[in-house]
Each structure stands twice: as structure tokens, then as C-alpha cells.
Amino acid sequence: MPTLFRFFATLAVLAGLAFAVMFALANFVVPTPREMSVTIPASKLQPGNR
């Protein structure tokens, strides 16, 4: 069973690294808000024209 234990230990280390990366991204990366504009075609604004 040493191979199985090594496999689980490797999976645990990889899961820990993934958790650490997600934690760092969630806490240390600050998104910058910015304005957004979307152009709507005139055909979508007319209610009777489907």
C-alpha cells in the first residue's frame, strides 16, 4: 500500500495548492469597475415588429 499512500499524498498536495491559488485570487486580486455600453439594434426596440 505505499504506492496508494503516495498517490493520495500527491492528490492532497495538489488539492492544497489549488485551494491556496483560489484563496489568493479571491483575496488579493481587486477587480477594477468600469462602465459598459451595449448597442441595441432599432428593430429590437419596436414592440410590434417581430
Image (spheres, helix red, strand yellow):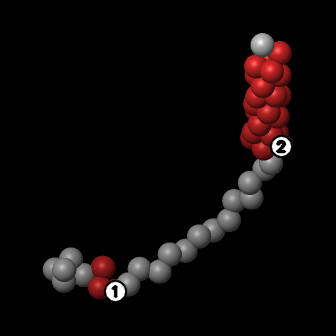
Circle 2 residue: 28
Q: Residue at x 47, y 80 (%)?
A: 39
On residue 27, the disc is: none
- Corner quadrant of residue 3: top right
x and y percentages locating residue 9 in the rendered image: 81, 22
Q: Quadrant of the C terminus?
A: bottom left
Task: Please name whichever residue, 2 or 46, is drawn nearer the observer in this view of the structure.
Answer: 2
Q: Residue at x 41, y 80 (%)?
A: 40
Task: Please name whichever residue, 32 or 20, is drawn nearer the observer in this view of the structure.
Answer: 20
Q: Is residue 1 left or right of residue 33?
A: right
Badge 2: few (under 14), some or many (20 or more) residues near its Cα, within 10 Å?
few
Quick one: which residue is furthest to the left in this view?
48
Badge 1: few (under 14), some or many (20 or more) residues near its Cα, within 10 Å?
few
Amino acid type of the residue tagged 2 in the rendering: Phe
Circle 1 residue: 42
- What separation in Å lies between label 1 and label 2 (alpha carbons)? 42 Å
What count of labels does the image hold? 2
Mark 1: secondary structure = helix
Seen in the picture, residue 5 relative to 10 is either above or below; the reply is above
Mark 2: secondary structure = helix
Amino acid type of the residue tagged 1 in the rendering: Ala
Camera sees residue 23: no
Camera sees residue 50: yes
Q: Is residue 46 left or right of residue 19?
A: left
Task: Please name whichever residue, 3 or 44, is drawn nearer the observer in this view of the structure.
Answer: 3
x and y percentages locating residue 43 in the rendered image: 29, 85
Nearer the viewer's eye, disc 1 or disc 2?
A: 2
- Corner quadrant of residue 25: top right
Q: Are marks 1 and 2 in contact (CB under 8 Å)?
A: no
x and y percentages locating residue 35 in the rendered image: 63, 68
x and y percentages locating residue 42 in the rendered image: 34, 86
